[in-house]
């Protein structure tokens, strides 16, 4: 495994350092497609609180979790080993709970405090996303609020989601995929990890040109509580006329021994269905986000996308 530099960018004093931060973000997005944010405004205690309540949900019996059923039309709800990856031909070895602001939530009886805690966390994720997206808007020649408004989760047509993820312990699975190689379909992903729960591998840089990154060199990115791993998604790559890079990543079991439980939290900025996306250079035809998303899901998962219908 080759070691690569994943830029670490501080958001401290964002208002007074905006120009400097913008350049750092753009450099990272153009060259690596991945970067890590620190001094972002969510404390370690708040992140641990969200992980704790996520674990409380995943610790429930399957029949209780299934009360928050997965809906293929909205992609919200609980799913268990249900995501088939074309890159591996197998199902990801994880369970997850997809949430939007207006989706069904686990009941207060089953997980006390779940909704209040998670809504606060989502609001903080949105605020951090807005800072990053405002920088990319200016760099691409849009108004500063363009990508911010395009990803405004308070609008009813916004597809932004929070995904709570649990990879169960894996025995006799050395070197296998807990999540197959993929890029993210949306605009911008914020990923939270927990100390010691490794497995994420990334393939940053312009060299990720082969099918699903096969044959390319992936680099492990150790899990640390606090910093946020951020990556560009396919949507923002297209919206930037391919200037900003969406890159492959995966979650891999340990080469030796048992892989313990891994928990992660992903905040996917997936934009508003009715927004029209086209880059400043007009490299690609103008299309609604909903149409683009549906085509991308169908292409990536070989099934009819119903989420944007």
Image (tube, grey):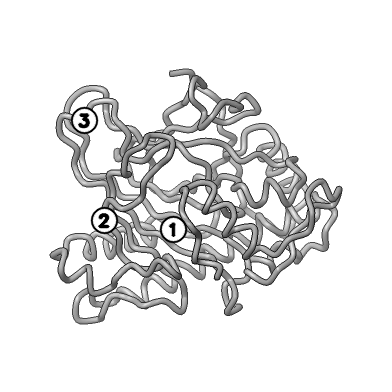
Question: Image quadrant for the C terminus?
Answer: bottom right
Q: Which residue is mark 1?
A: 43
Residue in the image at 68% along x and 57% along y? 133
Marks 3 and 1: which is nearer the front?
3
Q: Position of residue 55 (x, y in %)?
A: 24, 59
Q: Which type of secondary structure does the marked residue at label 3 adopt?
A: loop
Say if mark 1 contacts mark 2, CB within 8 Å. Answer: no
Mark 3 / mark 1, whichever is N-terminal: 1
The N terminus, quarter of image = top left
In the displayed structure image, the side of residue 190 where residue 242 appears, left or right: right
Q: Which mark is residue 80?
A: 2
**Residue 17 visible at all:** no
Residue 291 against residue 7 in the figure, above or below: below
Q: Which mark is residue 173?
A: 3
Q: Residue at x 52, y 28 (%)?
A: 213
Q: Position of residue 276 (x, y in %)?
A: 74, 65
Indicate the position of residue 59 as horizontal and vertical percent values: 17, 60
């Amino acid at each position: 495994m080759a070691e690569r530099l994943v830029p670490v960018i501080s958001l401290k004093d964002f208002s007074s350092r905006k120009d400097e931060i913008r350049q750092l973000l753009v450099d990272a997005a153009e060259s690596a497609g991945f970067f890590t944010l620190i001094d972002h405004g969510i404390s370690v205690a708040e992140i641990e609180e969200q992980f704790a309540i996520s674990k409380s949900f995943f610790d429930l019996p399957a029949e209780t979790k299934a009360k928050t059923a997965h809906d293929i039309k909205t992609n919200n709800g609980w799913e268990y080993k249900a995501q088939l990856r074309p890159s591996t031909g197998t199902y990801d070895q994880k369970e997850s709970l997809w949430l939007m602001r207006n989706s069904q939530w686990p009941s207060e009886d089953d997980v006390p405090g779940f909704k209040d805690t998670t809504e606060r966390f989502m609001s903080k994720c949105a605020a951090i996303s807005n800072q990053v997206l405002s920088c990319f808007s200016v760099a691409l020649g849009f108004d500063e609020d363009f990508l911010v408004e395009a990803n405004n989760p308070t609008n009813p047509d916004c597809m932004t989601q929070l995904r709570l993820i649990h990879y169960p312990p894996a025995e006799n699975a050395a070197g296998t995929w807990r999540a197959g190689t993929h890029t993210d379909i949306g605009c911008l992903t914020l990923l939270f990890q927990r100390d010691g729960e490794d497995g994420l591998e990334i393939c940053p840089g312009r060299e990720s040109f082969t099918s699903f990154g096969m044959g390319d060199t992936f680099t492990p990115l150790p899990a640390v509580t606090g910093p946020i791993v951020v990556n560009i998604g396919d949507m923002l790559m297209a919206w930037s006329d391919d200037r900003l890079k969406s890159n492959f990543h995966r979650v891999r079991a340990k080469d030796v021994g048992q892989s313990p439980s891994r928990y992660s939290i992903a905040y996917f900025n997936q934009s508003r269905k009715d927004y029209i996306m086209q880059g400043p250079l007009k490299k690609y035809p103008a299309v609604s986000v909903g149409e683009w998303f549906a085509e991308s899901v169908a292409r990536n998962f070989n099934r009819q996308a119903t989420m944007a219908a």
